[in-house]
Image (cartoon, coloured by chain):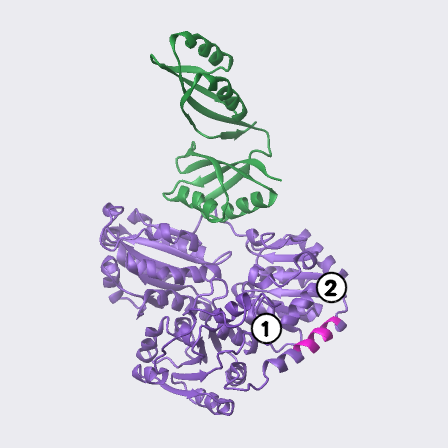
Amino acid sequence: MNKRHVLSILVENYSGTLSKVAGLFSRRGYNIDTLNVAETQDPKISRITVTVTGDGYVLEQITKQLNKLINVIKITNLTECASVLRELMLVKISCTTSTRSELTQIANIFRAHIVDVSAKSITIQITGDESKNSGFLELVKPYGIIEITRTGLTAIERG
Amino acid sequence: MKIKVSEAIVKCLEKENVKVLFGYPGGAVLPLYEALRSSSIEHILVRQEQSAAHMASGYGRASGKVGVCLATSGPGATNLITGIATAYMDSIPLIAITGQVNSQMIGRDMFQEADISGASEPFTKHNFLVKNADELPRIIKEAFYISNSGRKGPVLIDIPKDIQNQIIDFSYPKKINIRGYKPTYNGNTRQIKKAVEYINKSKKPIICVGGGISSSDAKKELVEFVKKTKIPVVCSLMGVDSFPNDSKYFAGLLGSHGYPFINNYMNKSDLLIVIGARFADRSTSMLNKSEVTKNVIHIDIDPAEIGKNVSTKVPIVGDAKNILNSLLQYNYSINTDEWLNNIQGKRKLYKEKLLEINKTGINPRRLIKKISDNMNDEGILTADVGLNQIWSAHCFSAKKERKFMTSGGLGTMGYSLPAAIGAKIAKKECDVVSVMGDGGFQMLLGELALITEHKLGVKIIIFNNNYLGMVKELQLNAYGKDSYYGVEIGFNPDFIKLAEAYGIEGMKISKEEEIDFAVERIFKDDKPFLLECIVDSNFPSIPRLGGRQNE
């Protein structure tokens, strides 16, 4: 059965490592839904968080093939353990003086922040798991979404 | 000790006990060649870089060491790729060193610039682009270790020209610590016990071996294990020389171009013990997968192979040699006499069928058999790709210390000749026979020059049917009678004159009764010899209709 999985991959921070990881996905025919990457507390090590959709076989193959990459140190499937998943999203919504207060209210309910306002638009920053962010998008859609950008999930194990 | 990086590279190679380099020079490797000039390493100048990789691979397979090839940046490097990919698919250890344009210039589309670390990524076990001169000794140390451990494979090191000229404080590292690379060598005891239970419960077991037996040097252990359990052995193309072909437990080659009866027996078996084999499509396309895979014990050093192509009851990750040794600690009480006799009876019939006298021209299988009968016990046969590969795999008897080398995974035409040259350079005392079709021979035939240049007694067999026979057979099987296209070789040179031009003696035969004389002539001395055999263009790969369609 196809399921969404969040994989947290620790890699040695050499040039070309990201392309090795990303290349492996496309080469073996797996789709990356989201991807994000940054250094960890140890500058020699980076963490790549990817979300992929697939059944048990696909997930097993992805994990095994990733493990074969020399620069990959450790892979954790965060969907299988208690973990905190977050995504940051910036949404630019068209907005007039008459709708500004409504949008501000919605932002407050979602504990989002207004980071920019202009005569015709308002930009809101929201952090949460994917369902919260998608819920927010549904709600503001009628106002007219001009542009969005989202980081993709990043995640960490609890405890 | 302060030395240039180019000198450090040579020193590292010497420390790794490299005696021979197969290479082709160019602008981006000038400093390296200057350093090689005064070293003890022999440089073999190839005629095309692809051959350098095949030769290094043949050299490595014959000697059990890591072959090294070398090319300049750009086209030199890209020409290597087919050879590297060939080694990758067959898990052959190999080091490829390429020159690169100056590091400050990378990305500016310089003359002879190619992103070879990017391009070779899908075909290498690992690759390095050296950006910091000080890291070079560590990188070379790691490259050799990665290439020749775990599941072996090619590793590429790309070294910009300016880095080759930098001065470093050289010391060769003694220890290796790669955080993300720790291959498993010993099998899990619980799984091994489970495997023993499965074996003892089975009535019709089969062992299926691949190239993993050779790469872990586990032939002796396999023979012991088979003697103890009395289980028949089948092999993939890569596993032809994994088990003595003259043993009464040897059943033959499986797969789409294997012995047809073997696929039947595979379907009837109740336990499959797969050792060091991927069990890829060419091996399993003829099998009734859901039946065959009811009970599979899969032993492989690469965890990703287990469960990839067949589902497995007992997965054992580790080195075949160690695991077979562990399995040998147990007692087995199974009776396979009837099962074995059955298979052996079929094998005998099939062998007779293979060697039936041909109506027109030569039966190429009889020729291979004759060569096999006359070769010494350490002999090496390299087969190309196509009909000649199948004829060779079926009729060459890989017994004793003999080796059968071919491009099993990637199926690279042109592999045979350079691989044979590499093998002969590694093992001068062994008979080395290179078998090819008229198509494959012409892919890298410039390498003939090396045979004369380095006085290598390589014996060349060309099966000439004026067609790309395997493709033609596939076309006929897929689209029906007369529907072949693009496979006729409209003009072939006179191969005997060609050999003569390269300083190699040759002979052409077209009749059955000439085989004995010709093969005796081949093995009369240790000089190179080219034998051209005219083969009927409809001679099939396997006795019953070949190809996947008709099985």
Label 2 crowd bin: few (<14), some (14–19), many (20+), radius 10 Å: few
- Amino acid type indicated by mark 1: Leu
Q: Is residue B201 left or right of residue B516?
A: right
> Do we see residue B189 in this rendering?
yes
Task: Please give the label number shown on residue B249.
Answer: none
Q: Residue at x 52, y 40 (%)?
A: A75
Label 1 crowd bin: few (<14), some (14–19), many (20+), radius 10 Å: some
| Image chain in green | A
Question: As displayed, is residue B515 above or below residue B265?
Answer: below
> Do we see residue B430 in this rendering?
no
- Residue A11 pos. (x, y %): 45, 40
Which residue is at the front of the view, B40 or B531? B531
Q: Which residues are magenta?
A: B339-347
The image quadrant where one finds the C terminus of chain B is bottom right
Q: Is residue A38 left or right of residue B255?
A: left
Tally the numbered discs.
Answer: 2
For disc 1, the marked residue is: B545
For disc 2, the marked residue is: B331
- Amino acid type indicated by mark 2: Asn
Question: As displayed, is residue A22 above or below residue B34?
Answer: above
Which residue is at the front of the view, B179 or A1? A1
Q: Residue at x 48, y 57 (%)?
A: B149
Look at chain B in the picture and name its colour.
purple
How many angstroms separate mark 2 from mark 1 (CA)? 43 Å
Question: As displayed, is residue A47 above or below residue B33?
Answer: above
- Residue B397 pos. (x, y %): 56, 78
Which residue is at the front of the view, B482 or B525? B482
Q: Secondary structure at mark 2?
A: loop
Question: As displayed, is residue B358 above or below residue B279?
Answer: below
Q: Residue at x 47, y 87 (%)?
A: B519
Circles 2 and 1 on the same subunit:
yes
